[in-house]
Amino acid sequence: MIFQQFRNEGCLSYLAGNEKTRECMVIDPAKDIEQYIEAVEIKGLNLIYVIDTHSHADHITGAGKLAQKVKAAVVMSENVETQRKASEGKGYEMGIGDILKKNAAVKVDKKVRERDEIKSGTFSLEIIETPGHTLDSMCLLMKDRVLTGDSLMIGLCGRTDLPGGNTGIMYNSIFQKLNKLRDDLLVYPAHDYNGNINSAVGYEKVNNPFFLTRKPDEFIEFVRHVFPPPVVSGMQCGVTETGTTGAAPGALMGQMCVAMEKLFRELPDDWKKWNLIDVKELKKKLEADEKVFVLDVRTPEEYNAYHIKGARNIPVKELPKRVGELPEDKNSEIVTHCESGFRSAHAAIFLKAYGYTNVRNLEHGMHEWREEGYEVEK
């Protein structure tokens, strides 16, 4: 898979495509379309779809210009016309009237709905309708990640007080759709104001305050006090009353210890089975001197009693502040483990959210390693 993130101040956009067919898509393009054209040319790709995850209110979309320039098709939700009618003639008091008008003039060539797939060979994006920020908001589900538009940001959701926004509908999108996604999916939003690259669904479930208000009335009351008037916020789609515009990388790591405790209590047992490596495969890799960073996330006392030869010990609760001790190359192969595989599953999802691409969790951990009679050090 081909995947590239573009950052234009607080706006994030993406290029995703198929390595075999060389076809690609651009998602949520900013007004400066030359950056996408350049990336497509450098990679030798054919841009076939330009997708907007929703009708943008804070910036002029580049979807129309980009599609016209490269002869691609503009893709949006089938609810786009309903959203455009809801915002027609509105937003001028917020300073976004002209933006809404210009974006509403973009011709949409292909309209999609829930569970539709946008395909290129074996590569596909599945549509998840997530209205609330706008009536036409949607997320794009891939094999190992989800592009969430303004429906879900890092530590936030999109504001619901713009034309077409609805807090009750946003509640349904979060708790009936996003909350049911796999915890190991990487999250790539359309906005971030603090330099974050991505997050993970499981991490957002226990850190994002919009996920923590479990009842509809509590959620509506919470949101009512969160977003300041757009004229105050400068029309940032994720700004909150407290000035929080998403969790910065340091803040994400600082919350990790609390998140671990919540994860231990709240996640089902079968969640830890994602992305596993068994003890036999790991032993073969180590015997072949393959470059594997073995990360033991147990306590120092457990580690000192016995551990896999060459394993590095960083207790799971210390991982956020000691992440600098991990390999610099984010593509390095890392195997996390603990005694049973439970704590190390959470460590693996944290590392994946932090940007490491090749992380697996040792199934059944040290318990099975010793049960197989494999060598340990003290």
Image (cartoon, grey):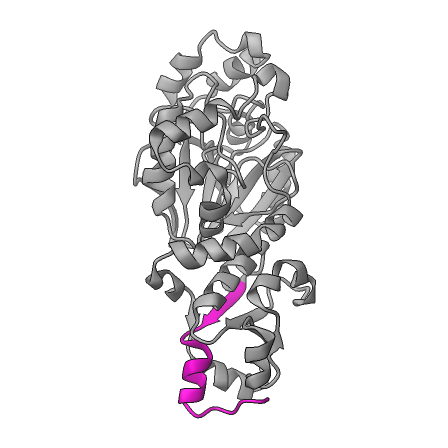
Image location (x, y in percent) of residue 98: 56, 12
| Viewer can see residue 19 | no
State the extent of the magenta-drawn residues as a range.
358-378
Side of 251 relative to 56 (left or right): right
Is residue 199 placed above or below 372 in the rendered structure? Answer: above
Q: Nearer the viewer, residue 336 or 260?
A: 260
- Residue in the picture at 51% in, 63% down: 348
Drawn side of residue 77 relative to residue 26, left or right = left
Q: Quadrant of residue 307?
A: bottom right
Q: Nearer the viewer, residue 353 or 5?
A: 353
Residue pushed farthest front? Answer: 301
Residue at 62% x, 76% y: name it.
312
How many numbered marks, from 0 up?
A: 0
- Residue 231 part of the magenta-drawn span: no
Residue 232 in percent (x, y) is at: 63, 17
Q: Position of residue 304 (x, y in %)?
A: 60, 83
Query: Residue 377 in the image: x percent, y percent?
Result: 58, 89
Q: Quadrant of the C terminus?
A: bottom right
13 is higher (above) or lower (below) than 163: below
Residue at the spot x=65%, y=62% of the render? 323
Question: Does 375 lie within the magenta span?
Answer: yes
Q: Which residue does the image show at 44% across and 46% down from the upper left?
A: 205
Q: Is residue 369 above or below residue 5?
A: below
